[in-house]
Image (spheres, rainbow, N blue to C red):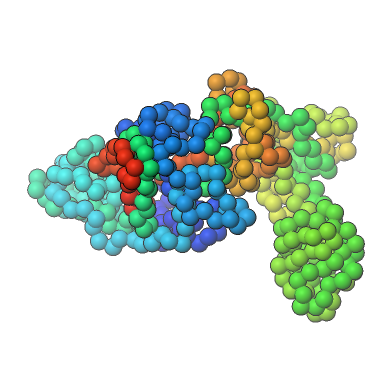
Amino acid sequence: MALLVTDQGEIDSLRTLLNATHEIPRNLVLKLYTGPATAPTEQDVPSATKYFEPYNASNNSGYGSAPTTGYPLIVNNRTEENQDYSAQYGILLNGNRWTIATTASAVATTTCSGTSGTYSITVADNTDIKKGDYVTATGVPINTYVVDIDGTALELSQKLSATITAGTACSFGRGRTTASYPEQIFTFTSAAGNVYGYYLARANNMPVTLQGVVDGGSVAPIGTSVVKEQCKGIIGNNYVELKDDTVVSAISSGAQNGFVITVASGTGVKKGQVVTGTNIPSETRVVGVATNDVYLDKAITGGNASGNATFKINIAEELTVGQAVTQTGGAGQTGPDAFPANTVITGIDLATKAGEQGPRVYLNNQLTDNVGTASSNDKVDFDYSVMTTDPSGSAVDHNLSPGDVIYIASGTGGSITSGDGHYTVHTVPTNSTFTTTPALSGTGDATLYSSIFFAEQFTNGPYAIQNNGDQIKVTLNVSLD
């Protein structure tokens, strides 16, 4: 059975999805689309034939060149780190401006009929009824909700406890949690064709020369695998343990109540690492590094910092879900291969548990032999592919940052074996390359789009944009039931 999401759980879920708490570095962007002509479905994804933005008046994809319609570069753009989206189009939303609340009373009322022992009712009017709405009527068990809607025929989650005669009052939508956003306005400067609806995407700064351009990227396996040494694993388990590692450097200064220490060498020290040392509070983390000056998130207490500072390295930082796992490519590896074919990472515990030597890396297959019984079989290889943004064969800057969410579709050549779908940028080795989580695999061309989180078709649309000054006004409502 699926878990029940309480009203408070729905509120918290929407707060997270919409970034109402500003815990996610990226807000959502409101975008318009000029296709499809049919209502959005849960299976829809962006492509060269639908969910493209009104860059021109042809109702065809105009990706690859700047809009000629007045469709705007990001409105409400911010210039802070990881908040500059000046290469993208649409309206940047502020997560704090969503109003989120649960409806205590019915959203829609009508009349219905149905037969006892069945899962179906027929309503006189389905206006404002949504999948997931709770149903209240004589003969409908408590906490019954709408599973499917086919015109005026509704499928319910529970059998009717009694026959419902035609004309019986019924209500829908009690408990619906809705987030609402103030009206937003798009003003055009010239014809833009028919605009069918709008969608919300997680913000990124992918340039117009790359966004939606067919075969704008190419995928290929990385030349050198990530190799971890001194790993341990027991036959039959579905995980291996990595070996924790640290950077140790002598402290030359660190004043009590201050937030900075100076060490002999800042090499290998990175933001986010846990640091320990005399008079440094437990669970203190690095928030910045300037050569040999290390900035902390907690004040030094009990006296000046002294002795050695020990920085715990995130030994798993290069690893992510979906990477292939083997024991065949590590230098000097002569022991048995404990990993079945097609073994991949399914999860990572970054923190070290008591009695273990380091983080756990979970696998989709059980180990067929022990790992780490000797130096000849303690190495594990992690393989993945890298995306290069090179439309027309020439590398271009993708402007993407770790944490950005995009949609990657297979191109016209090769095979992305990890499949089309939403990916999060994991690392950015260069301005024209990036890796993802889940990890990409395979070789071939690819097309990159902004993700689609929410989509809606205009009820009275499409709206034909024909003249300078034509406007489209959008009021956003996102519901969970």
Q: Residue furthest top?
A: 413
The quarter holding residue 433 reads: top right
Between 59 and 177, the residue placed more toward the observer is: 59
Residue in front for this viewpoint, 50 or 139? 50
Q: Is residue 232 above or below residue 357?
A: above
Residue 228 image offset from top left, x and y in percent:
79, 41
**In percent of the image, x 72 and y 47: which residue is there?**
317
Count of marks placed on residues: 0
Q: Residue at x 58, y 29 (%)?
A: 216
Spot occupied by residue 131 in the image (x, y as percentages of width and height): 31, 45
- Quadrant housing the N terminus: top left
Q: Is residue 474 left or right of residue 295?
A: left
Where is 309 relative to 206, above or below? below
Task: Find residue 443 and report its image quarter.
Answer: top right
Could one spot residue 131 in this view of the protein? no
- Residue 71 horizontal side relative to residue 430, left or right: left
Q: Is residue 191 visible?
A: yes
**Looking at the picture, how far across and down is residue 451, in whole percent?**
49, 40
Q: Between residues 114 and 70, which one lies in front from this camera angle?
A: 70
Q: Residue at 58%, 55% (x, y): give it.
A: 79
The x and y percentages for residue 326 are 74, 31
Q: Residue at x 37, y 47 (%)?
A: 187
Q: Is residue 342 left or right of residue 68?
A: right
Reply above or below: 50 against 271.
Answer: above
